Amino acid sequence: MKKITIAIDGYSSCGKSTMAKDLAREVGYIYIDSGAMYRAVTLYCLDNGLCTPEGIDTARLEAAMPHIRISFRLNPETGRPMTHLNDVNVEDRIRTMEVSAMVSPVAALGFVREALVKLQQQMGKEKGIVMDGRDIGTTVFPDAELKIFVVASAEIRAQRRYDELKAKGQEASYEEILTNVKERDYIDQNRAVSPLRQAEDALLLDNSHLTIEEQKQWLKERFEEAVK
Ligand code: DC
């Protein structure tokens, strides 16, 4: 069967990664969470004092970019990809509220996007990849054979992220998460470089009222149509 490229874009916390990850496992494709890469750069900024109350030290971050190595390694027990920053597993640290609160401004920087898009394109050279993010269908893989754009209401997305953090035993406030979700929507949609938008040839999926099982099934059907 021919291998294709699958781009899954949409708003934060709308279940893109769950469906992308499941499909990749089922069809034997590589799965890449591009948001994790922007989160890893943000964590680097926080750990190295590049995010200050005055903003991001863009000059120092730009100089540091060639030294920020991001990779994914499979956890042998769970089979899930773990994000590594300069060879250290940062999978849990990049999901904290501290990183979520800073990631959109970091992801709005042109030089950060340029470096990460290049890396993402390299990862997808051989096709057989499912990548999720904000600009995968528009910028990273404009020729992807299957493009999905996922939407759900901000309240439903905040509840999902709240449940996720709670399940991991992390402290969380629903109100704080909802504010963060709305702020990130605004920044992601209004930034100058590669703003979040639906590619013209992307299929729209509103999963506000779908179960994970239902959206998984929907995606599998779209995949089967695309590889036919
Ligand atoms: O999907 P996520 O919430 O983990 O993404 C984190 C942030 O990274 C989000 O605020 C937008 C940004 N992002 C992006 O700008 N482009 C991508 N391809 C993926 C994520």
Image (cartoon, rainbow, N blue to C red):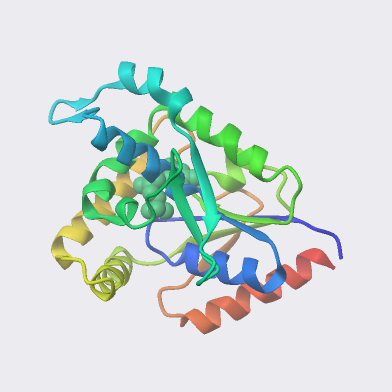
Please name the residue shown 15% across and 59% down the image.
Answer: 176
Left or right of 159 in this view: 7: right
Q: Is residue 169 above or below residue 140?
A: below
Percent of width and height locating residue 135: 53, 44
Q: Is residue 206 above or below residue 74?
A: below
User: Where, quadrant-wise, is the N terminus in this rendering?
Assistant: bottom right
Where's the C terminus, which quadrant?
A: bottom right
Q: Does 12 appear above or below 170?
A: above
In this view, the residue in front, 40 or 180, is 40
| 29 on left or right of 181 | right
Question: Which of 55/63 is in front?
Answer: 63
Residue at position x 48%, y 79% in the image: 212
Can the viewer see residue 192?
A: yes
**Measuring 26% from the left and 55% from the top, which residue is drawn there?**
96
**In the shown orientation, is residue 177 left or right of residue 77?**
left
Q: Quadrant of residue 63?
A: top left
Tally the marks: 0
* Residue 134, image x, y percentages: 48, 48
Residue 209 lies in quadrant: bottom left
Q: Please indicate, yes or no, whether residue 196 appears anywhere in the rendered image.
A: no
Judging depth in this view, the residue of 101 and 181 nearest the camera is 101
| Residue 98 image position (x, y, % from top left) | 21, 48
